[in-house]
Image (cartoon, rainbow, N blue to C red):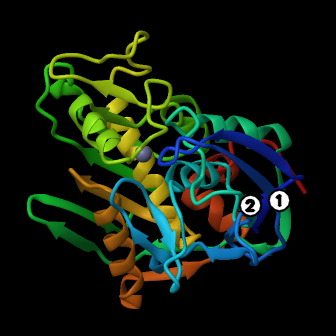
Amino acid sequence: MLKQCTLNKAISVTGIGLHSGKKVSVNFKPAPKNTGLVYRRTDLEPNVEFKCTADAVRDTQLCTALVNDAGVRISTIEHLQAALFALGIDNLFIEVNAPEVPIMDGSAYPFVYLLSQVGVKQLSAPKQFIKVTKPVRVEDGEKWAMVEPSSKGLQMDLTIDFKHPAMDPDKQHISIDFSGQLFRSDIASARTFCFLQDVEYMHAHNLALGGSLDNAVVLDDYRVLNNDGLRYEDEFVKHKLLDCIGDLYMSNKVLLGKFSAYKTGHHLNNQMIRELLAHPECYEIKTFNDEELSNVFGTPIDFIHSVAVNA
Ligand SMILES: [Zn+2]
């Protein structure tokens, strides 16, 4: 039986908030089985909790935010969500002393690195999967995202289409069979990217005050402005894939199926996961015993965990 996991022990990190530009601290604390991923705003008295669900995602303008009925939010959670998915963490308290999770370097790698330092621990409840049994597709103009059944764990196929001198048209498609190891080595470090004119506009409107070359790839009309250039030749599409992984994990369950998308973003990804969950005939909630798992994944533990697991 593949079991739910949480962190081995508590750990903290400090970084800059993308929107405020201010210092933000996060405490990651182990949580019991069946708790899920719970964000907690500790700057508010009393503290406000947000359980991570696809329905709680209510703002996808510049990032993914969870917003409660009173309009209180916790923003910029998508890269952390991708890291939690790749580390196989099902249950965790994430205490943040601000309205947003720090942007770190604009990728998921700092979270993967940090949480790997303490490792994960198995709990006694079975891990839950959403196995896609019929295709579900959502569209927005020419953009689309879909899931369909697959016998190979989580497959992902993503195409972006930017026409820009610094964005190679041959490096705007990616197709992977997801694994925790692949995520760590090939995807986690891909940074978010933006265009200089957008940065200037946002700063003029008091938005993304913490945004800089330290936490994004910035392009002017011709080139990448970061001195060190790109981390991967296809960093742009890899970052979009990272975003998709984080967005799909808002359900707090591991998707089994093939995800494909064209020019998708946070909003469409969230629409797709909501559409899937709204159609119970299109999926099954599964848990796996060891024999089933090895049939589905080959080496089951590698599918999700890229760190040592303590029983
Ligand atoms: Zn992103």
Badge 1: how crowded within 10 Å, few (<14), some, or many (20+)? some
The residue located at (39%, 68%) in the rendering is 59
Q: Quadrant of residue 22?
A: top right
Q: Position of residue 159 (x, y in %)?
A: 23, 44
Quadrant showing the C terminus: bottom right
The residue located at (76%, 69%) in the rendering is 1
Read off the residue under disc 1. 29
Circle nearer the viewer, 2 or 1: 2
Q: Position of residue 79 (x, y in %)?
A: 52, 48
The residue located at (41%, 89%) in the rendering is 280
Q: Position of residue 211 (x, y in %)?
A: 44, 36
Read off the residue under disc 2. 95
Q: Quadrant of residue 289?
A: bottom right
Looking at the image, which residue sits at the far top? Answer: 227
Amino acid type shown at disc 1: Lys
- The answer, for residue 10, to whether it is visible in the render is yes
Q: Which mark is residue 77?
A: none
- The answer, for residue 2, to whether it is visible in the render is no
Out of 1 and 165, give the one closest to the viewer.
165
Out of 100 and 186, give the one closest to the viewer.
100
Q: Position of residue 142 (x, y in %)?
A: 9, 58
Mark 1: secondary structure: strand
The residue located at (34%, 20%) in the rendering is 233
Is 275 positioned to the left or the right of 127 in the image?
left
The span from disc 2 to disc 1 (Cα, nearest Å) is 8 Å
Badge 2: how crowded within 10 Å, few (<14), some, or many (20+)? many
